[in-house]
Amino acid sequence: MASSQAVKITWLGHATVLVETAKGTTLLIDPFIENNPKYPKGFALPEKIDYILLTHGHGDHISDAAPVAAKHGSTVVAIHELAGFVAGQGVEKTIGMNLGGTVHLGDVAATMVEAKHSAGAQDGEGTHYVGIAAGYVLTLDGGPVIYAAGDTAVFGDMRLIGELYQPEIALLPIGGHYTMGPKEAAIAAQFVGVKTVLPLHFGTFPPLTGTPAQLAELLGSSVKVADWKPGDALLCDDDTFTFSPRRD
Ligand code: NI
Ligand code: MN
């Protein structure tokens, strides 16, 4: 990366992640804020959030998509049916896509990839079909390549994701119960071939018992597992990844 400004990946608790690129493109993955017990208290989102990326229709991933899009002027990116669902909630700008496709979001190429998970969206009228669960590979101009798995089990074709896109960093769910736990996430990290794992979807609610320490022990010293707290960030500058604690 030739730029002097680092890429910043900030965890906002549960599966909510803010990515700020070197050129200033801002992406928010799976906004769960109002009812997220682990949202870092008082954390102020950037005034402008260019894109909101949704992995699937569950409430702990989309509940704040419409309000954040309205307040921060964001375009919501999601699988076709889910994009239509949030448009029905009043989101003005959406990009619907599907598995295997790539959209260009400023200096980020976002490719939608497979995930193994259910994906209905619930509201007062019941459960709606909003497509299937997905993950994203985010290829940033100048690097890095980030694999955001979304809620998923481990699956063999994660090897294909590794082969095709060669991600350097993976955002993986590790809590168990509703997603893979540390045992499966360790295999996922090996399948995609990353050397840095940013664990998500753990500790939010009592059933999500997996921990970064468990994953780190399974992976050994060749893979770095972030022992991070909501509000902490990973800074990526050239090939150097540095963890940065939350600054209040
Ligand atoms: Ni889910
Ligand atoms: Mn979830």
Image (spheres, helix red, strand yellow):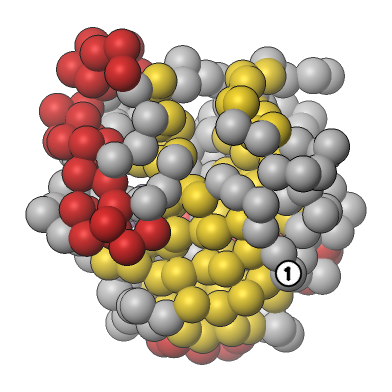
Which percent across, then down, holds residue 17? 58, 44
Above or below, 215 relative to 186: above
Residue wearing tag 1: 106
Quadrant, the C terminus: top right
Some atom of ligand 2 lies within 8 Å of the CB belonging to the residue at label 1: no
Say which quadrant the N terminus sits in.
top right
- Total number of numbered discs in the rendering: 1
Which quadrant would residue 245 be assigned to in this image? top right
In the shown orientation, is residue 172 left or right of residue 5? left
Q: Which residue is drawn at 38% across and 30% down?
A: 195
- Tell which of 195 and 155 is nearer to you: 195
Left or right of residue 227: residue 67: right
- 56 sits left or right of 229 in the view: left
| Residue drawn at the location 54% of the way across and 40% of the way down | 36
Q: Which of 177 and 192 is in front in this view?
A: 192
6 versus 162 height, above or below: above
Q: Is residue 59 visible?
A: no
The single residue placed furthest to the front in the displayed view is 2
The amino acid pointed to by label 1 is Gly
Farthest left residue in view: 156
| Residue under the point 78% across and 30% down | 42
Instruction: Provide residue 120's location: percent of width, then percent of height.
Output: 31, 71
Quadrant of residue 55 in the image? bottom left
Using the image as rendered, state which of residue 196 and residue 31 is in the foreground. Answer: 196
Q: Would residue 24 be seen by someone viewing this image from the given angle? A: yes
